[in-house]
Amino acid sequence: MPARRLPLALLLASHLLTPPASAQNSEQNRYYVQQMIELAAANDDSGVTAMQRVLEQSPKPTATDPAGARAALQRGLAALEQNELTAALSAFQQASRADASNVEASNYLGLVYRKLDRLTEAESALQLTLVLEPARAVAWFQLAQVYGLQKDPHRALGALANTYRFAQNPMRAEEILRNIAENETVDTLRDAALAALRLYRLPAEAVIVPPLPANPDIKPLNARPGSRSVVLPKRPAP
């Protein structure tokens, strides 16, 4: 069920009154990410922009070991390139612990969690990525895939809408959305891509499912002219 949208003035006031660098603030920032999804699904451009500004102005975590985080990130990328997901996961976790403000580490952590079908953890990591960088289109795209796999069409739509909204190359983003709408095997994500195209008034057509091939074990029974044909199964060969 979609999260309830609150008035923007109330959200902004809540943000200003919340003590920085607190656990409550972290959860509130994740809530703002969800509000960006809700507002994007409703095509509320000013609302999305307001939430984006709130997140951009939020205090960021302090790195405890930036050099260690960069080294772990490189190990993770090398493991991911070899499709060694367990090793990649461990490395990206280390990078995120060493530098909670490392947006690349949290983004790739979300990617690996999704590949491992650990969708709740993938959502959490990608939300953290968007708290750190709310205009990061690739993180929105990854989050849309998570919601598609979770069969959450509303949030998949909002995340895909933000993918297009923040894309540096809108033409390429439109091409990606159209490719998903035409070829994606996950129904929820395919329908969300189609809805996102329509949301932005981009050319979009619903996918036409091709007819099933004729069943070779069925043949028409000769019928009188003007009557409907009847089909009967072929008799098995003796």
Image (tube, rainbow, N blue to C red):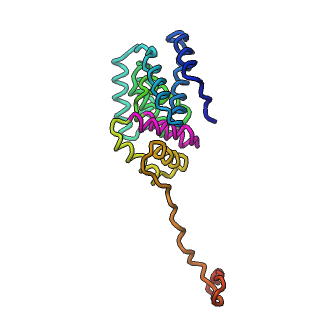
The percent position of residue 120, horizontal first and vertical second, equals 56, 33
Comparing 89 with 172, the one in front is: 172
Q: Is residue 194 above or below residue 122?
A: below
Q: Answer yes or no: is residue 87 visible.
A: no
The percent position of residue 234, horizontal first and vertical second, equals 63, 82
Quadrant where the C terminus lies? bottom right
Q: Left or right: where does residue 156 sit relative to residue 1?
A: left
Q: Left or right: where does residue 225 sit relative to residue 107?
A: right
Task: Verify whether residue 161 appears in magenta.
Answer: yes
Q: Residue at x 55, y 10 (%)?
A: 17
Comparing 87 with 132, the one in front is: 132
Secondary structure predominantly adopted by residues drawn in magenta:
helix
Task: Verify whether residue 74 appears in magenta.
Answer: no
Residue range highlighted in magenta? 139-166
Q: Is residue 60 above or below residue 52?
A: above
Q: Is residue 65 above or below residue 235?
A: above
Q: Residue at x 53, y 12 (%)?
A: 22
Q: Residue at x 41, y 38 (%)?
A: 164
